[in-house]
Image (tube, rainbow, N blue to C red):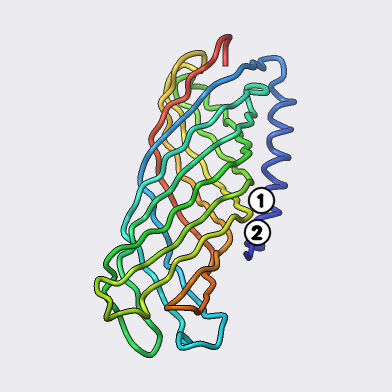
């Protein structure tokens, strides 16, 4: 999987900002545990399938997907009023829309989907606004994701449409959003996530194999954040 050239500098800058913000506001720091969750739309980039054997299936395949959904649940700890860490579980699902075979054109896909079940360690920076009921935040995380990609033809006449692959790979995400509500109580959250995980390998046609490009998705979720005792 290829990481953006800006990924490491962005993470380093984010960490520096978090430390500076934490030191600058230590006199007002609050701490506590919380749970959070959310659900929303998941937009999945096209996925290519590249043959890795010398069988009948030598042409690259291109999969497109319908709009899907994403859900997430996290347990977090507020270190101070500027920085939070979380352990998060998430699931993303998109149905297959179409499959195009190189040099053959589009084929009808009967069923298929791409899913990603991920466990992530996140860090979030809360930005002060002077308004206790509106708090923007940004950050990201790293972890692992179990990715599954499959596409099956609407009829047995299109056997070259078949692909069934899975794999567990390194995953990362960046994003941001805002929370609405008193920090010491329940909050409504709205956020955006850019999520990436490595490609998978799987069975093509009858006995051939192929590998996919990376799983790359963007999601917008509406959720909640609920403190677990104390002020956070």
Task: Farthest residue to the top: give it.
Answer: 230
Q: Residue, x 38% and y 82% (percent of image)?
A: 101
Q: Residue, x 60% and y 52% (percent of image)?
A: 171
Reply above or below: 50 against 47.
Answer: below
Q: Residues within 10 Å of mark 1 (few under 14, many from 20)?
A: few
User: Residue 31's x, y, as percent?
Assistant: 64, 17
User: Residue 63's x, y, as percent?
Assistant: 39, 70
Along the horizontal axis of the image, is 5 left or right of 222? right
The CA distance from mark 2 to mark 1 is: 6 Å
Judging from the image, what secondary structure is the residue with disc 1 in? Answer: helix
Q: Does the residue at mark 2 contact the one at mark 1 (Cβ under 8 Å)?
A: yes
Reply above or below: 129 against 9.
Answer: above
Along the horizontal axis of the image, is 194 left or right of 123? left
Q: Residues within 10 Å of mark 2 (few under 14, many from 20)?
A: few
User: Residue 102's x, y, as percent?
Assistant: 40, 85
Judging from the image, what secondary structure is the residue with disc 2 in? Answer: loop
Q: How many marks?
A: 2
Q: Residue, x 54% and y 72% (percent of image)?
A: 211
Residue matched to label 1: 10
**Viewport quadrant of the N terminus:** bottom right
Looking at the image, which is closer to me, 178 or 31? 31
Residue matched to label 2: 6
């Amino acid at each position: 999987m290829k990481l953006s050239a800006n990924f490491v500098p962005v993470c380093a800058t984010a960490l520096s900002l978090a430390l500076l913000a934490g030191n600058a506001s230590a006199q007002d720091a609050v701490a506590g545990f919380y749970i959070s969750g959310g659900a929303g739309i998941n937009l999945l980039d096209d996925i290519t399938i590249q043959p890795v054997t010398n069988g009948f299936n030598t042409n690259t395949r291109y999969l497109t997907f319908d709009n899907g959904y994403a859900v997430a649940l996290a347990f977090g700890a507020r270190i101070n009023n500027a920085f939070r860490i979380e352990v998060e579980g998430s699931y993303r699902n998109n149905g297959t829309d179409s499959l195009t075979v190189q040099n053959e054109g589009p084929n009808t896909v009967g069923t298929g989907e791409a899913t990603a079940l991920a466990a992530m360690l996140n860090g979030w920076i809360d930005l002060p606004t002077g308004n206790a009921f509106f708090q923007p935040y940004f950050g990201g995380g790293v972890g692992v994701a179990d990715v599954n990609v499959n596409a099956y033809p609407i009829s047995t006449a299109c056997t070259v449409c078949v692909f069934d692959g899975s794999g567990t790979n390194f995953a990362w995400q960046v994003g941001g959003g805002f929370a609405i509500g008193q920090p010491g109580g329940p909050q409504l959250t709205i956020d955006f996530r850019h999520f990436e995980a490595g490609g998978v390998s799987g069975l093509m046609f009858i006995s051939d194999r192929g590998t996919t490009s990376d799983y790359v998705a963007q999601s917008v979720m509406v959720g909640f954040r609920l403190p677990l005792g104390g002020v956070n």
